[in-house]
Image (tube, coloured by chain):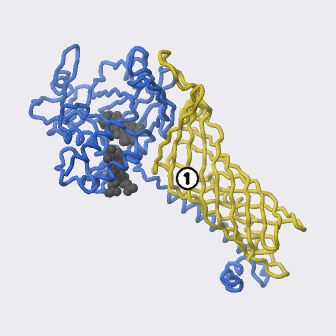
Chain colours: A yellow, B blue
Amino acid sequence: MNALPFLLAALMPLTLAGQPAARQRPHRASIGIQVSPLLGYRTIGTSTVDQRVVTNRNGLEIPWWGYTASISLSVPVSKRIALESGVGYVSRGYQTRPQALDWPGTVSDLPLSSTTRFGYHFLSIPGKATYTFGTGKLRGIVEAGFSMNVFIDQRVTIITRYAERETESASRKEVGVSRFSLFALIGAGVCYPISSRINVTLAPVFQYGITPLRPGLAVREHLYSGGVTIGLARRF
Amino acid sequence: MKKHEFNRLIQPIRRIFCPENRNPYARKRVAGCCVLVGILLIKMVGACQNDGLIAIGNTRSFLPKLSQYGIFQGNPANLNPSADFHLYELASTLFTDYAGKQRLIKLPPGTSLAAQGDGFPAFPSGTMLVKTFYYDKNQRDPSNGKVIIETRLLVKTDLGWNVATYLWADDQQEATLVTSGFTKTVNWVDGNGTAQVIAYHVPSERECTTCHQLSGDVVPIGPKLRNLNRPVTRNNRTLNQLDYLQQAGILSALSSSSVSALPAYSDADLPLETRARAYAEINCAHCHQAAGYAASTKLFFNYELPYDQTTIARHKGQIIHLMETGKMPRLGTTVVDQTGLALLKSYINSLP
């Protein structure tokens, strides 16, 4: 598996943590909540499968929204570095571009196009390190880590567009996706205190799937998602 | 929790990462720890790649294009089988999102199927079973043509059965091997003149073997003699299919009257129980039997099993609920089979 470099990169900031501890009073741990919209996009790459199938599938995919919400505990390990973990929920969305529908010409009120949306839902356990830099109130943060995802279910929705309306139907499956998958995440943003104990953070975050959603595939699925995390943290 | 209590709680974590004595080796130690944690995580996730399916690897490889098997002659879009491939039909069939299906069998030259009771005949090594899924563009008028989606193969070697499916290109001239599953938009006009659009799912090999397995061996499902024991029309003549297969030299000699028959669940003249059990036999029993994927549920739907051994009685409410919500069958459909659901509902409601 070529996942190792990603993970190492993700864990790099942790190695800085061995630096001498801060001389000032110890920094305090905090609990926080984070929410983020997640724009997801995926492609497949392969050498073993017929190129036509790959081109076909990649040609259909366009980004779609998901989101993530979590609560976490952040423990400072030095003046600038904190380790953060928690639990959350993540919905990863992907979709096809609208596809024109062809009909035998005899019937009226026919749908013109359709889009298929794929939603994968997980429990998430993030683990990351954040590095804070700058002085003063507004500070910069860089974060890196991973998100372990525990599969809940998968929903396929088809949106059918008529000339003047839209209909939707969905089906749900609980098998076919790995029980566990691992995503690497990196982000950078700003952090601002809105009171003596409460910090807000705003950080664009990027995620990449380092294990496949479905095991044993002949294709390598590349899963990308990006979003902006909005977080509130309260120090103890 | 008080502040000092909390601080004490996280003290050990701090000690690992912020060694107070500024040991020059501390950084290396921490770095080492992180790498270890990383490797462990990847190994853990790798070991937990369980997707709830039963994956059984093929023991032979498949050719990349369907045309390489010479299954169809003339324009492939007409699905006109070559001379070696014989059409067969089942009395009761699996519901797959309203797809139409063509089933073919090819035996190695000079061999035939040997009957063994009314279950599966003995298939010689080299047997090829072919199932092609298509939709009539307008179910009220088949002359509008059809869209062929996929052709699934089961091929027997000395080591057992192998699975593969081929996805048809839009030009309907060729189909390509797909092992990892595929979702394709399919639309048609149904029997009521209503437009239907679905996200048709071409199964991955792992899904194939989850349905097509008993105790870890890949097996066919449809062509049990009792499910083949039905009338068919061949060369403008209607005859029993078992007789036809013998005439065509595919089936070894037997008397079709000695074989029991699985009823056609679509036949509204048959008793409700018979129809419902036939439906469940072909739509549920491949998983719900003692050696199947759902063995642990003890809910068995084999047609030949007496009612009191099925545990249907204990699962009445669940059967209807899980079908209504599309959770059962667990694989192979994306829409609820409303006709099948109505049939099982009236059967369950008729039970004491």
**Vertical relation: A17 (above or below) B277:** below
Count of number-bearing discs? 1
Q: Which of A70 and B211 is in front in this view?
A: A70
Classed neighbour count for the residue bearing mark 1: other residues with Cα under 10 Å, few (<14), some (14–19), many (≥20): many
Q: Is residue A65 left or right of residue B171?
A: right
Residue A89 picture quarter: bottom right
Q: Quadrant of the N terminus of chain B?
A: bottom right
Residue B282 picture quarter: top left
**Vertical relation: B267 (above or below) A139:** above
Q: Which of A127 and B99 is in front in this view?
A: B99
Residue B96: x and y in percent read: 38, 35
What's the amino acid at mark 1?
A: His
Q: Residue drawn at (24%, 35%), measured in percent from left and top?
A: B265
Name the residue carrying label 1: A121
Residue A158: x and y in percent read: 53, 37
Residue B348: x and y in percent read: 25, 47
Q: Residue drawn at (46%, 36%), measured in percent from left and top?
A: B202
Q: Is residue B123 left or right of residue A139?
A: left
Residue B110 picture quarter: top left
Residue B247: x and y in percent read: 17, 21
Identify the element where label 1 is drawn. Answer: strand
Chain that bears disc 1: A
